[in-house]
Image (tube, grey):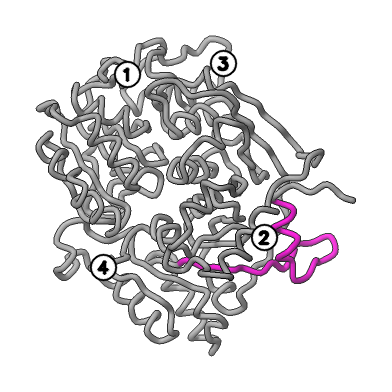
Amino acid sequence: MEKKTLFDKIWDAHVVKSIPKGPDVFFIDKHFIHEVTSPVAFLNLEQRGVSVLYPERTIATPDHNVPTVDQDKTIKDQLSRMQVDKLRENCKKYGIELHDLGTDHHGIVHVIGPELGVTQPGMTIVCGDSHTSTHGAFGTIAFGIGTSEVEMVLATQCIMQAKPKKMRITVDGELGKGVTSKDIILYIISKISASGGTGYFIEYAGSAIRNLSMEARMTICNMSIEMGARGGLIAPDETTFNYLEGKRYAPKGEEWEKAVANWKTLKTDEGAVFDKEYHYDAADIEPMITYGTNPGMGIKVKDRIPTTEGMDGSTKNTYLKSLDYMGFHPGDPIKGKKVDYVFVGSCTNGRIEDIRSVAQFVKGKKKADNITAWIVPGSREVEKKAIEEGLVAILEEAGFKLRQPGCSACLAMNDDKIPAGKYAVSTSNRNFEGRQGPGARTLLASPLTVAAVAITGEIADPREIF
């Protein structure tokens, strides 16, 4: 009997047709849409006279362009307002479920899917957004698609895809004090590089991964795309089932028992072969931070920025250009550098567990005077819990500013931009030039490291401040 990986089991079960020497026609269980990548797809459908085949398999929410203040008022930015209005019109026209601004389950698309129990093991999930890989934490094949593919899925519920190669990354052992899942993934990307996963779908395994919460697993899978991978996934287990049980769209009663029995089969067979494997020791992972302009440029907070020793001409020039943009120099210590902004939020770290960890860290403390501190919940549900649990009161007492749900300062598509030349330590997923605003300088880190930065006003090791 053929030994299959988890990825193979899900992929093979969803192939409608294989094209010889070509891609597979691949069925999609759930399709998430938002206001940025869907308007043109719907316009093309209308021009072709084609409808949405399975509207019940699509779920919508506005998140990228929306303001995170005064969401009950008319959106000021004309383009953002037009895109959100178009999303509303299209959802109404085609009977698609919309979690709009101000509703109980509004939020970032990759936060509300798991919260609602829409995301379930064994599924195939797509969205016109690269960080769709987040949903892989539940044992799904989830990946981002382009606008033309959004149109294809709306019209046919299928997509044409070449099967990627398979990679397994195993992290064994116990994490040290102050080390989070964000540090795990930043560590892995720093080892593999921002292109080391290109052409692969990654399965994360090992005791350190199994011991993570669902929120932490989502952070890991979310940033799979940042090493060039098509996506990442983790085998479902009791942690997964406990998270999903009772959620709005999770199976109920006998259907739940049947679903769990099926989900328990979703694991890689012993002896299944991967195209590439990496193994890491959790004990070597420490609080991480990026210093350059791609997520692979990461180091331990206690370390110095790498020198150019051993680099060839073109690599060296690119490296120095990146450091010049950031205002850093080879060999400098990263710790102690002054910072202007901190941001806790995004589909990477905008969940209740993230906000709890920051609140616990800053309780009884005050942010530094030079820091502007934004906390942006990933959804209305996260916002509600943060208020009910008293986390908002703790954060505001410490000088943080809570905003309303949305993608916010993860990307420069809304009002929450970092000014040119300013430094932001961010829990988001990308640190490209201009990602948080023209000329903004972004350093990626965990919520705990961000909290330490907020309190000290400079890059700091959270282990030294507990």
Q: Which mark lies nearer to you, 1 or 2? A: 2
Q: Who comes first in sequence, dot 4 or dot 1?
A: 4
Report the residue that reaches farthest toward the bottom. 49
Tell me where residue 270 appears, x and y as whole percent.
78, 40
Tell me where residue 240 appears, x and y as whole percent.
52, 50
When asked about the image quadrant of residue 93, the answer is: bottom left
Tell me where residue 169 appears, x and y as whole percent.
64, 34
- Cβ–Cβ below 8 Å for labels 3 and 2? no
- Does 200 appear in magenta? no
Q: Amino acid at mark 4?
A: Leu
Residue 314, visible in the rendered structure: no
The part of the chain drawn in magenta is: 7-32
Q: In the image, what residue occupies the spot 44% across and 20% down?
A: 176
Q: Residues within 10 Å of mark 1 (few under 14, many from 20)?
A: many
When asked about the image quadrant of residue 196, the answer is: top right
Q: CA distance from mark 2 to mark 4?
A: 36 Å
Q: Amino acid at mark 3?
A: Met
* Circle 2: element type: helix
Q: Would you say 61 lies left or right of 282 here?
A: left
Tell me where residue 230 appears, x and y as whole percent.
61, 49
Q: Would you say 237 lies left or right of 244 here?
A: right
Q: Who comes first in sequence, dot 3 or dot 1?
A: 3
Q: CA distance from mark 3 to mark 2?
A: 50 Å
Tag 3 residue: 311
Q: Who comes first in sequence, dot 3 or dot 2?
A: 2
Tag 2 residue: 262
